[in-house]
Amino acid sequence: MEGKPTPDDPSDNEADASANRRWPTWRRLLLIVGAIVVGLLVLIQAVPYGRDHTNPPVTATTTWDSPQTQSLFATACGDCHSNETEWPWYSNIAPVSWLTEKDVKDGREELNISEAQSEVEVEEMVEVIRDGSMPPWFYTIPHPDADLSSREKEALITGLEATFLGRESTDPRGEEAESEDEQDES
Ligand code: HEC
């Protein structure tokens, strides 16, 4: 039989009894919080958004300047900027599935190498690779290979320029050529 805690009696027994009384409260709280979290995670799986994992047909092919450029692009950019997206298992689980579907949808709208583009903005690609905004940082957590080293970035940039500017521009300065803004690509 246990009475109320008696703080004026700091014996070992008292400390044990007091700990025993506190634990259940702690545990109950943890259980409640845990149950709410699990319940919410289960509930949000019912949201229909995030299930669309379609890869539309590839209707345009890119003539890459080298297999290396192709592979760097596939590793760092292809999941969101092509129709050859690899959907990992966690892309089926909300809330990750929501973010995945939205990123792929928005990414493809901006740039999709699997479909004919009115124009491929090479300079924009170079810029986002240089400033590190692409690939997005959260993508590189489950895809560490996409976190390109500075050498890989330079190789990808040079390759993208050779691939997408090569036909228009034979400027031997390559990435130094900054004056393309004025060129009409269409
Ligand atoms: C996780 C998906 C994802 C990956 C991987 C990814 N992108 Fe993006 N990208 C997006 C999204 C979403 C947008 C549009 C919204 C935005 O700008 O953040 C975008 C926009 C862009 C744009 C348009 C300019 C801009 O900033 O809006 C370019 C160019 C681009 N990406 C290039 C790349 C390149 C090059 C790579 C690889 C080095 C890459 N992206 C990797 C999702 C991605």
Image (cartoon, helix red, strand yellow):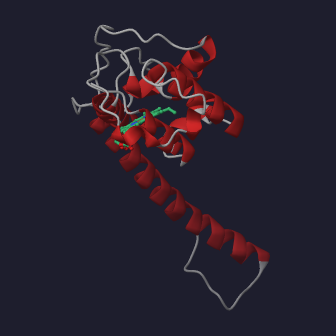
8, above or below 17, in the image:
below
Residue that sits furthest to the right in the current view: 12
Q: Quadrant of the C terminus?
A: top left
Q: How many marks?
A: 0
Nearer to us in this view, 164 or 141 = 164
Residue 31 location (% of width, % of height): 46, 51
Residue 24 location (% of width, % of height): 53, 60
Nearer to us in this view, 55 or 32 = 55
Residue 183 location (% of width, % of height): 35, 35
35, above or below 67, in the image:
below
85, above or below 127, in the image:
above
The residue sitting at 74% across, 85% down in the picture is 10
Residue 148 location (% of width, % of height): 64, 35
- Asked which quadrant contains residue 111, the reply is top left
Is residue 178 rendered to the left or right of residue 152? left
Is residue 50 rendered to the left or right of residue 7? left
Nearer to us in this view, 39 or 26 = 39
- Asked which quadrant contains residue 66, the reply is top right
Residue that sits furthest to the bottom in the current view: 8
Is residue 66 rendered to the left or right of residue 178? right
The quadrant of the picture showing ligand 1 is: top left
Q: Quadrant of the N terminus?
A: bottom right
The residue sitting at 43% across, 32% down in the picture is 122
Residue 89 shows in this picture: no
Nearer to us in this view, 88 or 143 = 143
Residue 26 shows in this picture: yes
